[in-house]
């Protein structure tokens, strides 16, 4: 949740008036990762040598604050794969930014199995002690077997949930703390979404849903920046061409339930307009038609300091650490390039971007966000791992046949 200092109020008010203050930013601190999840290809681009030094991180933090950033997500890759995560958190917190760290919740793996180690949780504790109050932890299924299949490692579900319960316990009672499950919606979990909301609530978390993006064919990865990071995995997608009616019924049932739960105050972080846009996307493959404020209300910075208007585009803008960057960001030259880039984009379903736009473009989006910020959703009391583990669906003896075939193929 946002820390509402006078400075943050002023920035949000200016963003609402001008839509030209980048109140939200994403920093992928590293592309390295300890997992190789089925739908994700970011880990293939990890390169420690290109990553920023502690001094460069401080420079970046000061620049973000001067540009007006209020909320920063630190993602990756896996942020905990970077030994500089703590340096980054210290630098950004010192500049008064609200931080959210996106993590897979899994410390170590040996390729096939998760290796339990206290070193990872010690680092989580250090990051919390520095002042980080918001984490997003990925969890895509309540069936441990399915989630382990997605993450390509045995023991992933148990370890991610162990981390979640640890975080919820540490953060309980801290004003502004909002640990959240990041759940990627796919063919594999469409029927589980309402139960995922209940699970989140029962363990003291909120939840955010993001429809899966997949490559349409194995070679489509050259198309754009983001397409290098997503993969061709038809078994995880919804087959909207061959089975439209059946898919529409499944999607409608899932999203009707989510929208109803959201209206009833359940801890779902996505806005209602975003949930409706997700429903449309999953049924038709169409992205939201509204314009996009990438590069104006938000931006993204890659592990090497490359500035992009959002997660997907790769226009060559000035490097974020270039001494002239701030003047460039406010220049007509940049605004023109940004307009061409965002205007020519086919769209996307990233909640962080769409919900930031929605907040400043629609009254419904603005009031929902304001409500969420001033009165965070009710989550349950933190659960112990033993309690959370009871809620797992361990009744699935085998994965569905089509997944076993796909895994073998
Ligand atoms: C790229 S990860 C980075 C942070 C961290 N490694 C994690 O997994 O939470 C951020 C989010 O992107 C999601 N993601 C990865 N590949 C995706 C895809 N093809 N479509 C939609 N979301 C995806 C992940 O599940 C995760 O919730
Ligand atoms: S989704 Fe996150 S954990 Fe999984 S491979 Fe991608 S970066 Fe790593
Ligand atoms: S719609 Fe296009 S320009 Fe806008 S955030 Fe998504 S990928 Fe970026």
Image (cartoon, rainbow, N blue to C red):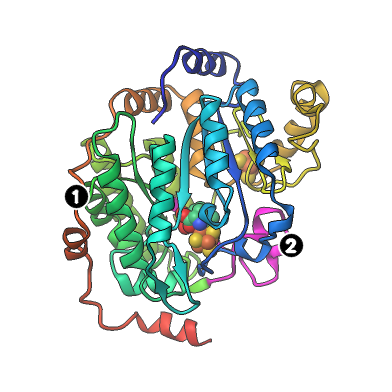
- Disc 2 is placed on an element classified as helix
Percent coordinates x, y for residue 303 in the rendering: 67, 48
View quadrant of ligand 3: top right
Residue 321 appearing in the image: yes
Position of 175 relative to 213 (above/below) = above
Within-10-Å neighbours for mark 2: few <14, some 14–19, many 20+:
few
Distance from Cα at disc 1 to Cα at disc 2: 42 Å
Q: Is residue 284 visible?
A: no
Q: Magenta stretch?
A: 209-233
Q: Is residue 345 left or right of residue 333?
A: left
Magenta highlight: main SS: loop
Q: Circles 1 and 2: CB distance less than 8 Å?
A: no
Specify whether 37 is left or right of 395: right
Q: Which residue is mark 2?
A: 222
Residue 338 in picture, x, y percent from top left: 74, 33
Residue position for label 1:
202
The answer to whether the beta carbon of the residue marked 1 is less than 8 Å from any atom of ligand 1 is no
Q: Is residue 230 left or right of residue 339?
A: left
Q: Residue at x 65, y 38 (%)?
A: 57
Residue at (46% x, 71% y) in the render:
109
In the image, 27 versus 346, the foreground residue is: 27
């Amino acid at each position: 949740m946002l820390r509402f200092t006078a400075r943050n109020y002023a920035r949000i008010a200016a963003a609402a008036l001008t839509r030209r203050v980048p109140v939200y930013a994403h920093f992928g601190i590293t592309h390295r990762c300890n997992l190789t999840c089925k739908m994700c290809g970011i880990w293939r681009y990890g390169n420690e040598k290109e990553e920023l030094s502690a001094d460069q991180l401080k420079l970046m933090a000061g620049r973000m604050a001067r540009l007006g950033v209020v909320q920063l997500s630190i993602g990756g890759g896996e942020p905990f794969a970077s030994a500089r995560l703590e340096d980054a958190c210290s630098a950004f917190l010192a500049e008064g930014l609200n931080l959210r760290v996106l993590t897979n919740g899994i410390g170590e793996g040996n390729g096939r199995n998760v290796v339990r180690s206290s070193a990872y949780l010690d680092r989580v504790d250090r990051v919390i002690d520095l002042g980080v109050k918001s984490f997003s932890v990925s969890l895509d299924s309540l069936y441990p077997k399915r989630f382990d299949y997605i993450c390509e490692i045995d023991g992933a579900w148990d370890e991610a949930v162990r981390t979640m319960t640890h975080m919820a316990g540490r953060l309980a009672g801290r004003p502004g703390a909002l640990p959240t499950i990041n759940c990627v919606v796919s063919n594999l979990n469409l029927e589980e979404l309402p139960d995922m909301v209940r699970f989140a609530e029962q363990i003291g978390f909120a939840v955010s849903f993001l429809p899966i993006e997949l490559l349409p064919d194995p070679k489509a990865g050259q198309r754009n920046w983001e397409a290098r990071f997503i993969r061709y995995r038809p078994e995880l997608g919804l087959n909207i061409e061959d089975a439209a009616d059946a898919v529409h019924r499944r999607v409608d049932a899932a999203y009707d339930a989510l929208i109803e739960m959201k209206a009833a105050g359940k801890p779902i972080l996505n806005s209602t307009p975003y949930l409706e846009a997700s429903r449309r996307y999953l049924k038709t493959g169409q992205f939201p038609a509204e314009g996009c404020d990438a590069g104006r209300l938000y931006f993204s910075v890659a592990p090497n300091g490359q500035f992009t208007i959002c997660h997907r585009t790769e226009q060559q803008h000035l490097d974020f650490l270039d001494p002239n960057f701030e003047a460039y960001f406010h220049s007509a030259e940049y605004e023109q390039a940004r307009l061409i880039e965002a205007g020519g984009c086919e769209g996307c379903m990233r909640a962080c971007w769409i919900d930031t736009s929605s907040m400043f473009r629609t009254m419904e989006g603005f009031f929902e966000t304001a409500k969420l910020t001033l009165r965070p959703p009710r989550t349950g009391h933190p659960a112990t791992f033993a309690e959370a583990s009871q809620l797992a669906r361990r009744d699935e003896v085998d994965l569905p046949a089509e997944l076993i075939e796909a895994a073998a193929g």
